[in-house]
Amino acid sequence: MGEAIGQVLLYGVAVALGPFPIIGVVLMLGTPRARTNGPALLLGFILGLSLVGTVVLLVSGGAGPGEQGQPATWVSALYLTVGALLLWTAVKQWRGRPRGDEEPAMPGWMARVDSFTPPKAAGLGTALGALNPKNLLLVVAAAATIARTDTSAGAQAAALAVFVAIGALGTATPVVLYFALKERSQPFLDALKRWMERNNAAIVSVICLLVAAKLVGDAVSDLSA
């Protein structure tokens, strides 16, 4: 189990640093339903990560290393595919980053958060965890990495739980600060939201580039072994 956990730490940190879930939960914490909508979005985000990871593990069917101890070919092929898609995402985000005083483009749902109910906030969190392209690719890569290890189903489930817990840290931190500091947390949360909005493209580009380099490097190493 230790091997599987060690392999997914990078992916968990990459998910945790994703700007949109953090911006989303900060916006929720500034609405009249902050005490319910903030935790609801967080729980939905955790559910989204868990669902995608579980599906990948089930589809993989425990296809771990081959008889020679080498990773299964499908894992290397998946690494190359996900790595290429992340590299494309990195380039696209970097080229679309705001320049000068240009305002960054934000999703339309951010202007409607005041009207969100807890179920809708949870649904948004699930979408941010399971359907956001960057997170989807990262979760697939993490679950495939877990699947390639020669561990039991229980150990793989535990490794996935650790990945989800790490991935949710970024979104959970504003919620914890809100309940711990109450109104005193608002200036910090507002500043965090503005910084994330302004630097969203650069953050996503760097994350995707680093993970893409690891995935492609691992795939090439595995295929040449």
Image (cartoon, rainbow, N blue to C red):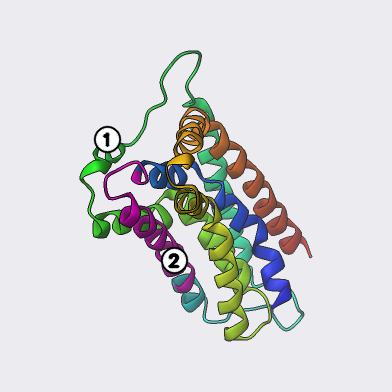
Q: Nearer the viewer, residue 47 or 180?
A: 180
Q: Is residue 54 above or below residue 15?
A: below
Q: Nearer the viewer, mark 2 or mark 1?
A: 1
Q: Position of residue 17 (x, y in %)?
A: 56, 46
Q: Residue at x 43, y 16 (%)?
A: 102
* Picture mark count: 2
Taking the image as drawn, is residue 78 in sight?
Answer: no
User: Residue 167 appears at what percent x and percent y?
Assistant: 55, 58
Q: Amino acid at mark 2?
A: Val
Residue 84 painted magenta: no
> In the rendered structure, does residue 46 fall within the stretch colored magenta?
yes
The three-letter code of the residue at mark 1 reads Ala
Per the image, label 2 sits on a secondary structure element best described as: helix
Quarter of the image where one finds residue 45: bottom left
* Residue located at (47% from left, 22% from top): 98
Magenta: predominant secondary structure element?
helix
Name which quarter of the figure residue 166 lies in: bottom right
Residue 54 spot, x, y in % from top left: 47, 73
Give the SS element for disc 1: helix
Q: Residues within 10 Å of mark 1 (few under 14, many from 20)?
A: few
Q: Is residue 103 visible in the rendered structure shown here? A: yes
Q: Quadrant of residue 75?
A: bottom right
Q: Quadrant of the C terminus?
A: bottom right
Which residue is located at x 39 percent, y 52 percent?
A: 128
- Depicted 82 relative to depicted 20: above or below: below
* Left or right of 35 on screen, residue 220: right
Magenta stretch? 28-54
Q: Which residue is mark 1?
A: 111
2 or 1: tag closer to the N-terminus: 2
- Residue 52's mark? 2
